[in-house]
Amino acid sequence: QVHLVESGGGLVQAGGSLRLSCTASGDPLKDYHLGWFRQAPGKDREFVANIGASGGFTDYDDSVKGRFVISRDNRKNTGHLQMNSLTPEDSAVYYCAARLSGTTFYWRPSSYDYWGQGTQVTVST
């Protein structure tokens, strides 16, 4: 199994950037596909981005496409989410998640086996 810890969240003004990190321990991260999700108060957890185990496949929710970039460094057992041109609508707790199996349903939270504790991102006007 793998243990995930997110970091890099914080308060930023609209138009600014943040880089989230997801640090893994336990099993090698290279064995897992990674996803980033977010959850705002009163809303369901929603898909943000996905990256395959080797880093060769990425996909994004339409709401972040062109602004966010997902990446990973398997040698360092870390994943990243670079977030640019942030808006107040991006404010949420951001979670990284890992799954062993490949699936076309990578946008579903239920597809993931392990989750981090989350990191708060707040974008002010």
Image: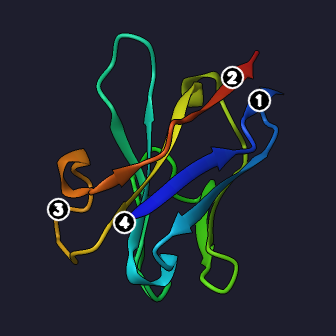
Asked whether 5 or 38 is in front, the reply is: 5
- What amino acid is at disc 3? Phe
Q: Which residue is mark 1?
A: 10
Q: Residue at x 27, y 57 (%)?
A: 113
Specify the color scheme.
rainbow
| Badge 1: residue crowd in 10 Å (few <14, some 14–19, many ≥20) | some
Secondary structure state at the residue bearing disc 2: strand
Of circles 1 and 4, the one toward us is: 4
Q: Is residue 20 above or below residue 91?
A: below
Secondary structure state at the residue bearing disc 3: loop
Of circles 1 and 2, the one toward us is: 1
- What amino acid is at disc 1? Gly
Q: Which residue is mark 3?
A: 105
Q: Which residue is mark 2?
A: 122
Please provide percent x and percent y for residue 53: 42, 82
Please provide percent x and percent y for residue 51: 44, 72
Mark found first going from the N terminus, 1 or 4: 4
Q: Quadrant of the C terminus?
A: top right
Mark found first going from the N terminus, 3 or 1: 1
Q: Is residue 123 above or below residue 67?
A: above
| Badge 4: residue crowd in 10 Å (few <14, some 14–19, many ≥20) | some
Q: Is residue 4 above or below residue 32?
A: above
Residue 50 marker: none
Q: CA distance from mark 1 to mark 4?
A: 28 Å
Mark found first going from the N terminus, 4 or 2: 4
Q: Which residue is mark 4?
A: 1
Q: CA distance from mark 3 to mark 2?
A: 28 Å
Q: Quadrant of the N terminus?
A: bottom left
